[in-house]
Image (tube, grey):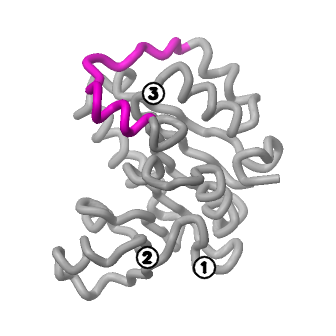
Amino acid sequence: MGFLERKSVNTVQEYFTPRQCGGVSGYTDQKYGLLNRYKHQTPWLSVGIGETGLEYEADLFCDFTFAPLRRQRLPWYRVTQADVQELPYQAGSIGLVSALSMLYYVPDQARAVDEIGRVLTPGGRAILEFLGWSLRAVHSMWKYPLQHYPLWPYQIRHLLREWKIIEWHRMLCDVQPAKHLLVVEHG
């Protein structure tokens, strides 16, 4: 049974969409706010550095490729080249994992999130950002840019906390293909 499927172990603490945060800029502020709120849970692993990951105050960085790091030329960061589906860290060794704007590029998101759960300490948190369930959603977004983010009914959020996280995420992707953030606590 994977990290996303363990209802009794992992709980969704918070959920955000751009619409709830007053647009894309508010959503971005919310992301940085979450990182600031939970950065005391160390060590903090930022997965998928890309072009913007180095602005975070993480302790460890992990990316599939070193190309963005070579462009940044910041050698003092502790960076590991690895696939998020097979993280090279011991089980229960990471206090906070942030995977922002990258999980939709991973072929097997469930496996990636399961691996993130494996490395989290008990009580550790993962801040996960999703865009659809597969690369198909990314392709459709590039092909037909979203003009508006669908409204997410506030009342349903409270009901969803009781679901298994994988069911929650799959339903979100069906209803709302736009970006959404989950804060998951590993118990």
Residue type, numbered disc 2:
Leu
Instruction: Name the residue that disc number 2 marks.
Output: 60
Residue type, numbered disc 3:
Pro
Q: Residues within 10 Å of mark 3 (few under 14, many from 20)?
A: many
Q: Which is more foreground, mark 2 or mark 3? A: 3
Q: Say whether residue 27 is left or right of residue 13.
A: left
* Total numbered badges shown on the rendered structure: 3
At mark 1, the secondary structure is loop
Label disc, if present, on residue 89 of the rendered structure: 1
**Badges 2 and 1: C-beta atoms under 8 Å apart?**
yes
Q: Residue at x 76, y 45 (%)?
A: 5
Alpha-carbon distance for marks 2 and 3? 30 Å
In the rendered image, residue 151 lying in the magenta stretch gets the answer: yes
Label disc, if present, on residue 177 of the rendered structure: 3
Which residues are drawn in magenta?
A: 137-154
Q: Say whether residue 153 is left or right of residue 53.
A: right
